[in-house]
Each structure stands twice: as structure tokens, then as C-alpha cells.
Image: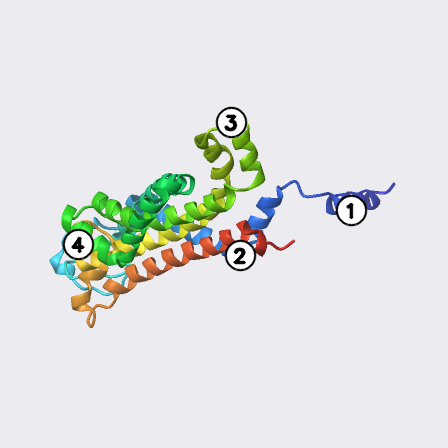
Amino acid sequence: MTDAAVDALGSAVTVGAPSTRPRWLRRLLANRNVMAGALILLAFVLAALLAGALSTHNPTRLEPAARLQPPSARHFLGTDEFGRDVWSLVLHGSRISLLVGVTTMLLTSVGGIAVGLVAGFSRRLDTVVMRVMDGLMAFPAILLAIALMAVRGSGVWNVIFALSIVYMPRTAMLIRSTVLSIRELDYVQAARALGREDAGIAVRHILPNCVGPLLVQGSFVFAYAILAEAILGFLGVGVPPYVPSWGNVIASGKNVIREAFWVSLFPGVALTLAGLSLNLLGDGLRDLLDPRLRVQ
């Protein structure tokens, strides 16, 4: 057999061989929304982790002589009215935004799972718990967050606490609805007939079915938390003004928007891209995890 024939046979075997990648991984990599959102989000994560190395100036250092300078080789994104480098402010501000977003997402997920499971399994507590959740959701999210911040004061962890209280009811109601749709299924009734306790049934049979909706909801809570943190910072009730955050930087540029538009523009662009990445990720995960939307 000639070398050309061997090469041709090897190519045919390679083409005809089944892929070693799991089906879920192939579908994940083929979803454009997931990949686009993940890549943009990864860029922000790397920027936050490497902010110290990528920054060209100290973000908290005031340089009155360099105030309101346009973008240049020395100041990539210009300076604000205090002479602070906007590029460095945006990089360090990503740390605050991601910290608030990730922590709020985790707290709302844990709290929502606990409340949703209790409400879904206990008919006596369901009415009481859901009325409390309805009461919290009756308030506009940002107004409730402002009220909680007014009580607790400014600070990163107070922002996280306020946003967790605001968005937890939505996750709790999602988990409750999932529990109500599953608890009457045959395999759950069979587990109960075998003497399994409700806690064991919830962990072993109910909770795994909540993972898909929880992932999608978590991505949107992440995006909402980043946006809400920026709004609170813009209004002056979020993190302290001296802490670099996207909301604080946007707020610092509102008084000089005509002569120095770049102060508010670039952190606004970063905020928009971060929200877009998480929305793309959430939409893609929904398409992948919803059986009704799967492409066979």
C-alpha cells in the first residue's frame, strides 16, 4: 500500500470516527450566545484580576494639574475632574462590580433555594412565606435597595446585603414553582412511600431538577446586581465616593459631561458590555437547558 493510500485511509478513519467530546459540551460550544457572553465576561474577570498590573496610574491619586485631559498616550481614556486616570478607575471599578454581582448571585441562590424548598414542601408555611415574598416584590427593586441602604449606610457589603434582599424573592418563587411541579410526580411519590423524609427527597430528587432554572436565573441576577450597584453609586447611596466603581465614576462625570464626555462614557460602555455578556450567557443557557428549545 502506498503512502498516499495510507494517508487517505487515515483521513477517512479520522473523519468517520465519533467525537470524543460529551454531547452537552458540543452543544455548549456550538451556542453562539453562550460563547460570546462567556468570552466578554472572561475579559472582565481578567481585567479585574490583573487591574493592578494593567493600571497605568493609582486610581485614587488626585492630580489637579491633569484634570479633564482627553484620551492620550499617557491617559488612555482621559482623566476626570480630579485628575484621576479613567482607564485605571474602570479597571479597578470592575472589581467592585464583579464582587457585588457574584456575591449577590450566590446569596440569592442559597436563600432562594432554602425559602423555595420550604414553601414548596410545607403547605402550612407556603402561604405565609409567599405573602412575605410578594410584599418584597411589590416595591420597585431600586427603591427598596435605596431604603435598605438608607438604614444600613454606604459600603460594599451593605450594597450586597440590600441587593440580596431585593432579588432573593424572585429566585425563591422560581424554586417554589419547580418544587410544586415535581413533588407530585410518580418517582417522588414512590420515594415518599418508601419512607424517605422530605429533606432527603428535596436534596436527592427535587434539587437536581432546579439546577437548570437556577443557573439561568443566577446569570440574570448577576447582571441586575451589577446594574443596580452602578445606579446606587450614581445616586450616592452605594459604595463610598472615594472607592473606584463604575457608578461613582459615571456620577463624577455628570457635571462635566459637555467638556469631558469621556469620564462617563467609558465606564458606561463597560457597564453595558458586562450586562450584555450576562444576558447573552443567560439566554444561551436557557436555550441549552430548556428541553422544549433543544435542537435534536
Q: Nearer the viewer, mark 2 or mark 3?
A: 3
Label 3 crowding class (10 Å Cα cut-off): few <14, some 14-19, many 20+?
Answer: few
What residue is pinned by disc 4?
237
Label 4 crowding class (10 Å Cα cut-off): few <14, some 14-19, many 20+?
Answer: many
Left or right: where 46 falls relative to 100: right
Disc 4 is placed on an element classified as: loop
Report the Cα–Cα distance between label 2 and label 3.
46 Å
Left or right: where 80 falls relative to 203: left
What residue is pinned by disc 1?
12
Report the Cα–Cα distance between label 4 and label 2.
37 Å
Disc 1 is placed on an element classified as: helix
Marks 1/4 in contact by CB < 8 Å: the verdict is: no
Query: Of callouts 4 and 2, which one flags the residue occurring earlier in the amino acid sequence?
Result: 2
What residue is pinned by disc 2?
32
- On the question of residue 60 being in view, the answer is no
Say the numbered circle drawn on residue 243: none
What residue is pinned by disc 3?
195
Report the Cα–Cα distance between label 3 and label 4.
52 Å
Query: Of callouts 2 and 3, which one flags the residue occurring earlier in the amino acid sequence?
Result: 2
Query: Of callouts 1 and 4, which one flags the residue occurring earlier in the amino acid sequence?
Result: 1
Left or right: where 116 falls relative to 238: right
Label 2 crowding class (10 Å Cα cut-off): few <14, some 14-19, many 20+?
Answer: some
Q: What residue type is disc 3 on?
A: Gly
Q: Nearer the viewer, mark 1 or mark 3?
A: 3
State the residue at coordinates (40%, 41%).
Answer: 123
Q: What residue type is disc 1 on?
A: Ala
Q: Quadrant of the N terminus?
A: top right
Marks 4/2 in contact by CB < 8 Å: the verdict is: no
Marks 3/4 in contact by CB < 8 Å: the verdict is: no
Report the Cα–Cα distance between label 1 and label 3.
56 Å
Q: Nearer the viewer, mark 4 or mark 2?
A: 4
